Image: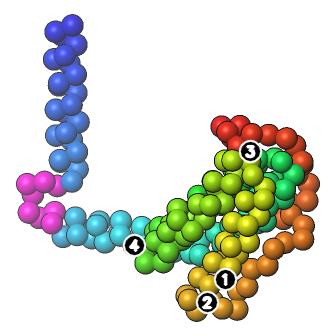
Amino acid sequence: MRRLKWLLMLVVFATSAAALAMAGCGDSSSTSSNVANNDNVQQQLDELKSGLPKFAVPMREVGDRFDDMYFASKGGNWALASYMSRYMNKAMNPAKVTKPDEYPVWASFYTDTFNPVNEAIAAKDFEAFDLAYSQAIIDCNACHKSMGYDFIVILKADHPADTHTDYTLKTEPTDVP
């Protein structure tokens, strides 16, 4: 056991020493290469960030899940409604990075304004769901307008986005893994 502990300490020390040597620590001549390397890393991060969707692409997914949530609730497939709500919210995660000033508006909407919809799903109460869902549509349109997107007007869908899904499967909101 003692030998294993010493061996582990030796590996950690050797790995740390190698990492320091590769980073050029203690070598003032490598300062300019470290700056260049940091610039390269930043450039790569900026390129990755530019490839992430802003708001428009995730909002398309939000819209589809929002529509499907309605038909799932109406049909009694409460697990699907809960699932759609959860992943509707997660679809907006790229905006945390790409639109850090706008993402809090979404986060607040989902946690506060949209909460009555989630509560109605948890209670399996379609009447309460329908009221909360209709109010969410009004709130979505008000938000779009306040952010300068008043040309985006949400309506209650007359059919689900995914027409090949069984919305009438009887499930519980807690059936989502």
Mark 3 is surrounded, within 10 Å at the Cα level, by few (under 14), some (14 to 19) or many (20 or more) other residues, namely many
Residues at discs 3 and 1 in contact (Cβ within 8 Å): no
> Which circle, 2 or 4, is nearer the viewer?
2
Where in the figure is residue 85, as x and y percent of width and height? Answer: 67, 56
Q: Which tag, 4 or 1, sits closer to the chain's start? A: 4
Q: Mark 3 points at which residue?
A: 79
Q: Indicate which disc, 2 or 4, sits on the residue closer to the N terminus.
A: 4
Disc 4 target residue: 43
Identify the residue under disc 1: 141
Three-letter amino acid code at the position of disc 3: Ala
> Looking at the image, do the residues carrying marks 1 and 2 touch, with CB atoms under 8 Å apart?
yes
Q: Is mark 3 on a helix, strand or loop?
A: helix
Left or right: residue 28 compared with residue 158: left
* Viewer-side residue, 134 vs 15: 134
Q: Residue 145 carries which label?
A: 2
Is residue 161 within the magenta segment?
A: no
| Residue 51 seen in render | no
Q: In this view, does 76 lie above or below 10?
A: below
Q: How far apart are marks 2 and 4 (CA)?
A: 35 Å
Gap in angstroms between the C-alphas marked 3 and 2: 32 Å
Mark 4 or mark 1: which is in front?
A: 1
The secondary element bearing badge 1 is classed as helix
Name the kind of residue labelled 2 in the image: Lys
* Segment colored magenta: 24-31
Residue type marked 1? Asn
Q: In which quarter of the image is residue 151?
A: bottom right
> Residue at horizontal 43%, vertical 78%?
101
